């Protein structure tokens, strides 16, 4: 058998897996694409082992290790995907990336509301009740300072 046939098949499998990793948005399909890429590598290892007529069969031994690592990877990966799906309700990679970026505080401070004050006090409850997340204009939501003035004049 020529070496070209398994090498071309492995290249096609690897390219299909690479396309799946880059184009898919579902985490489970990305994991399946990674497995497809690992199987392409395994096919190349076995094909070159047979072609070189290695007496130690190093390519086949390395393939067994790759299969064991791939099994562990898919087990841990599926466990992570299931926990994320249980907590967030989706396994869409873009939605998970967007929520991770919105949770992180880019300024690095622990301010409660747009840098107005840190911590939690009695005015946070008033501010949270009046705050509308659909509008980002600070003029339409005066914040707790205006609430203090209204309470002082009343």
Image (cartoon, helix red, strand yellow):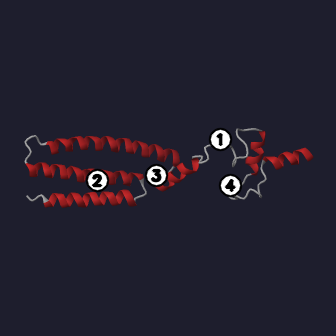
Residue 103: % across, % down: 58, 47
Provide the residue designation for mark 4: 133
- Of discs 1 and 2, which sits in the foreground? 1
Is 107 or 20 nearer to us in this picture?
107
Alpha-carbon span between mark 1 and mark 2: 43 Å
Alpha-carbon span between mark 3 and mark 4: 25 Å
Contact between marks 3 and 4 (CB within 8 A): the answer is no
Is 73 or 83 nearer to us in this picture?
73
Q: Secondary structure at mark 1?
A: loop
The first of marks 4 and 2 along the sequence is: 2
Disc number at residue 37? 2
Q: Secondary structure at mark 4?
A: loop
Alpha-carbon span between mark 3 and mark 1: 29 Å
- Of discs 1 and 4, which sits in the foreground? 1
Work out whether residue 54 can be spotted: yes
Q: Is residue 76 above or below residue 95?
A: above
The first of marks 2 and 3 along the sequence is: 2
Disc number at residue 91? 3
Provide the residue designation for mark 1: 110
Alpha-carbon span between mark 2 and mark 3: 21 Å
Contact between marks 3 and 1 (CB within 8 A): the answer is no
Relative to 124, 34 lies left or right: left
Alpha-carbon span between mark 1 and mark 4: 19 Å
The first of marks 3 and 4 along the sequence is: 3
Work out whether residue 92 can be spotted: no
């Amino acid at each position: 058998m020529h070496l070209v046939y398994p090498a071309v098949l492995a290249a096609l499998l690897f390219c299909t897996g690479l396309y799946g990793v880059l184009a898919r948005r579902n985490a489970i399909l990305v994991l399946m694409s990674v497995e497809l890429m690992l199987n392409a590598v395994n096919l190349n290892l076995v094909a070159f082992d047979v072609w070189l007529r290695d007496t130690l069969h190093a390519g086949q031994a390395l393939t067994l290790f790759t299969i064991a690592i791939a099994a562990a990877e898919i087990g841990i990966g599926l466990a992570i995907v299931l926990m994320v799906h249980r907590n967030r309700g989706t396994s869409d990679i873009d939605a998970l990336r967007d929520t991770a970026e919105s949770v992180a505080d880019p300024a690095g401070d622990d301010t409660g509301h747009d840098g107005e004050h840190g911590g939690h006090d009695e005015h946070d409850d008033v501010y949270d009740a009046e705050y509308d997340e659909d509008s980002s204009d600070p003029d339409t939501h005066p914040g707790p300072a205006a609430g203090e003035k209204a309470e002082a004049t009343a």
